[in-house]
């Protein structure tokens, strides 16, 4: 099988997802929009992963490729691909299927708990998840839950943390793929995001939670395995 990745900035990559793809013998290719690369035809891949990034989904003047990316996401959805959107990626999918995105009332950066909705825990991607867990966040925007989807989770800092569209299109606001190394790189390039706030932690704390990185990466593997189950 072939996976394609939409990458928006050099310092946000697949994290633990890459090793899972390799363990399942996926080929991995990418479109680096920050290098003005054009997305491929939807016939060139089986899975699409839309990663995060610091931009807003409506910044067309500064990032004109956003329109091309949204068109490519729409074609992937229409053709029945398995699609995973993370953070900005989830916002992009929400926009493509008709939901609004907006500035969240708080930034959410660091380790904070999410509570999963009971219905989502019945899906194979989440069947091994607890009712509540601490996950890694890095966002200032949010989205409305698209009509006809299943809510994934909520947190005190952000009500809408994800949605499931059909059986194999998933958008999640938080990051289960983040490793300690990828968190260091994100912090290095995004220090200006770390301002005072109720749901903003300092880098020193974020990087000392080794057990939490291990936990979220394990659960990302479980999530991907569940998506693979429903994609076959």
Image (cartoon, rainbow, N blue to C red):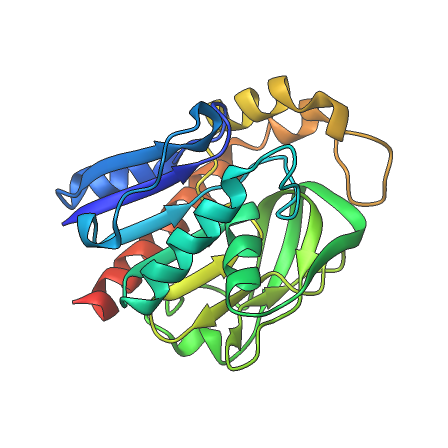
Q: Quadrant of residue 38?
A: top left
> What is the x, y in percent for residue 168?
33, 67
Is residue 129 shown above or below 148? above
In the rendered image, which quarter is residue 190 located in? top right
For the residue pair 99 and 37, the one nearer the viewer reads as 37
Q: Residue 151 at what x, y percent from top left? A: 55, 73
The quadrant in which the C terminus is found is: bottom left
Left or right? Give the position of 75 relative to 50.
Answer: left
Residue positioned 37% across, 70% down in the render: 127
Report whether 175 appears left or right of 22: right
Q: Residue at x 44, y 41 (%)?
A: 177
Instruction: In the rendered view, tell whether residue 188 sits above or below residue 214.
Output: above
Question: What is the count of numbered marks?
Answer: 0
Report the residue at 51% width, 62% height from top: 96
In the image, what residue occupies the spot 67% across and 65% down?
A: 100
Left-right relation of 171 to 107: left
Q: Position of residue 43 (x, y in %)?
A: 19, 54
Residue nearest the observer in this picture, 39 or 99 = 39
Q: Nearer the viewer, residue 54 or 219?
A: 54
Left or right: 170 with respect to 1? right
Q: Position of residue 53 (x, y in %)?
A: 56, 36
In the displayed structure, 31 sits above or below 133; it is above
């Amino acid at each position: 099988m072939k996976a394609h990745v939409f990458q928006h900035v050099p310092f946000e990559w697949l994290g633990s997802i890459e090793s899972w793809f390799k363990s399942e013998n996926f080929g991995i290719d990418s479109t680096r929009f920050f290098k003005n690369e054009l997305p491929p035809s939807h016939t060139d891949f089986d899975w699409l992963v839309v990663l995060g990034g610091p931009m807003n989904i409506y910044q067309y003047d500064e990032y004109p490729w956003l329109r091309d990316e949204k068109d490519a996401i729409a074609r992937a959805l229409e053709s029945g691909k398995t699609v995973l959107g993370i953070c900005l990626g989830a916002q992009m999918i929400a926009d493509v299927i008709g939901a609004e995105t907006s500035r969240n009332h708080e930034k959410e950066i660091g380790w904070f708990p999410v509570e999963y909705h009971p219905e989502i825990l019945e899906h194979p991607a989440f069947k091994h998840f607890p009712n509540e867990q601490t996950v890694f966040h890095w966002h200032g925007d949010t989205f409305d839950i698209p009509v006809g989807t299943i809510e994934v989770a909520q947190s005190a800092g952000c009500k809408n943390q994800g949605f499931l569209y059909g059986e194999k299109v998933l958008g999640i606001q938080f990051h289960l793929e983040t490793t300690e190394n990828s968190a260091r790189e994100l912090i290095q390039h995004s220090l200006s995001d770390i301002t005072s706030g109720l749901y903003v932690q300092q880098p020193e704390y974020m990087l000392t939670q080794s057990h939490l990185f291990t936990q979220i990466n394990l659960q990302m593997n479980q999530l991907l395995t569940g998506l693979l189950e429903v994609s076959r």
